Amino acid sequence: MNKIKLAIILFAFTHTTYGQESFNLQEAIDYALVNSNEMKMAQLDIEDAEAQITEFKAIGMPQLDAGINYQYYMAVPVNPVQDFITPSVYDVLEDEQLVPLESFEGPPEVFEFSFFQKNNLTANLNASWLLFDGSYLTGLRGARMFRDLNKKAVDVKAEKVRSNVTKAYMNILIAEENKKTLEKNIANINKSLNEAEAFYENGFLEKLDVDRILLSLENVSTEKEKIDQIIDISYNLLKFQMSYPLENEISITEDLETLVNLLKIENADLEETIDFNKRAEFAQIEMGEDLNELNIERLKKGYLPNLRARANVNESLQRNNLFDGDEIGFIPQASVSLGLNIPIFDGNQKKGQIQQAKIEQERIGIQKSEFQRAVSLQVANARMQYINAKKTLSNRERALNIVEDIYKTTQIKFKEGVGSSLEVTQAESQLFSAQANYISALYDLLITKTDLDIALGNI
């Protein structure tokens, strides 16, 4: 029973701890950088590049292999051999007068002769080592640079993740701020509705005045229901950008004011010099340029000789009866060799490859220049959009203050009986519109400041 109670307590604790997680903006970004599938794929690319380096290194490392081969001849290969021994022997005997002259006559006989035994068992050990190859050394540097290029790709993806999470986080804060405004409006309208119903019951207002306030309450309540749905959608978007489980609950710990201060939207440095090196894409292009330059060097070194050493040790057993110990046993053999390969003419293959690599280098140079132009344009546009958004927010804030004063004055006049409910309804409509415009302008300023930071490479 105690174990069951302990299990229930642990479950309740873990459910409370992990059932819903809270994130500030930086925590949300950090979570996304660790769990994003794009980041995981980029990390796999780095691991793959590491494996390619290991594979390429093997070309210049000593190679060693061993083998055993058994061969059985069902029909032993033979060669027809002319009997040159018998005539030679008779010639010697005749010269020594040991046999009568011309005792051997006729053409030499032909008989079958074989160098093979039925059973052949061979064991060998082979070793080789590439002692020198200029293109190999350059290629190894290129493989390492390719790994670094993949690391830059991780930085590019990280920029994208940070941007997407930041904007998704801001969507929630704006929606939550909108919801607070609507809840405040609903509370004010309910208060006005209660007062109006009391005035109506005492005969100081008409039913039409009460209905107008009630209609306004219905409209604002409908807007609040819509914003609740928008908040749910915004949370799902944030979870998606973070690669957080969609079925789990999530909450955010920062409010709009905190984020405004964090992003320093009121203090953007519009004179900040563009540093292209802050952009991960630029570093990626430059590394691609260096990698292609290294490829040209590797191709040129392909004209150099390469030197390779080899060694071989083997033992062979050849018998008619494999297990007959009276026959000859294993016969050892060993050799070493040193080979120098000198390229002379390859039909202009390398020349064509070098020309292609140089053309690619020119393409990368153009791509680099275009990226710089594109970033300059992006920064210029982001600065103008930020300035316009800031002016718009200032105008919307002044307009909101004016409309709030008008609304307060209209309510006072209505309560004192010198104003109509229609004026109150119109003032409410203007107030709600001004509030929405202000929140929209604040969102635009946040977005433009974020886009400016992205363009400058500060995110």
Image: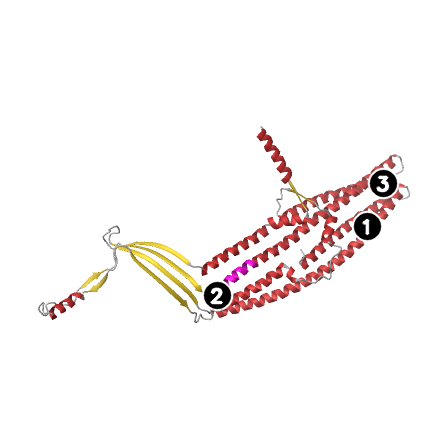
**Which corner quadrant of the image does residue 9 belong to?**
top right
Mark linked to residue 209: 3
Query: Can residue 147 be seen from the camera position used here?
Result: yes
The label number, if any, that marks residue 400 in the structure image: 1
Closer to viewer: mark 1 or mark 2: 2
* 434 vs 205, nearest the viewer: 434
Quarter residue 365 falls in = bottom right
Horizontal and vertical percent position of residue 230: 70, 46
Q: Amino acid at mark 1?
A: Leu
Distance, label 3 to label 2, CA atoms, is 90 Å
Give whichever of discs 3 and 2 has the lower sequence position.
2
3D distance between C-alphas at marks 1 and 2: 71 Å
| Residue at screen point 86% across, 36% down | 198
Q: Is residue 122 left or right of residue 438?
A: left
> Height in image: 412 above or below 149?
above
Q: Amino acid at mark 3?
A: Asp
Q: Which residues are magenta?
A: 137-148
Q: Residue at x 76, y 53 (%)?
A: 441
- Left or right, 68 with reference to 82: right
Which mark identifies residue 135? 2
Q: Is residue 139 magenta?
A: yes
Sooner in the amino-acid sequence: mark 1 or mark 3: 3
Taking depth in this image into account, of 199 and 440 the one nearest to the observer is 440
Image coordinates of residue 357 in percent, x first then y, are 53, 67
Badge count: 3
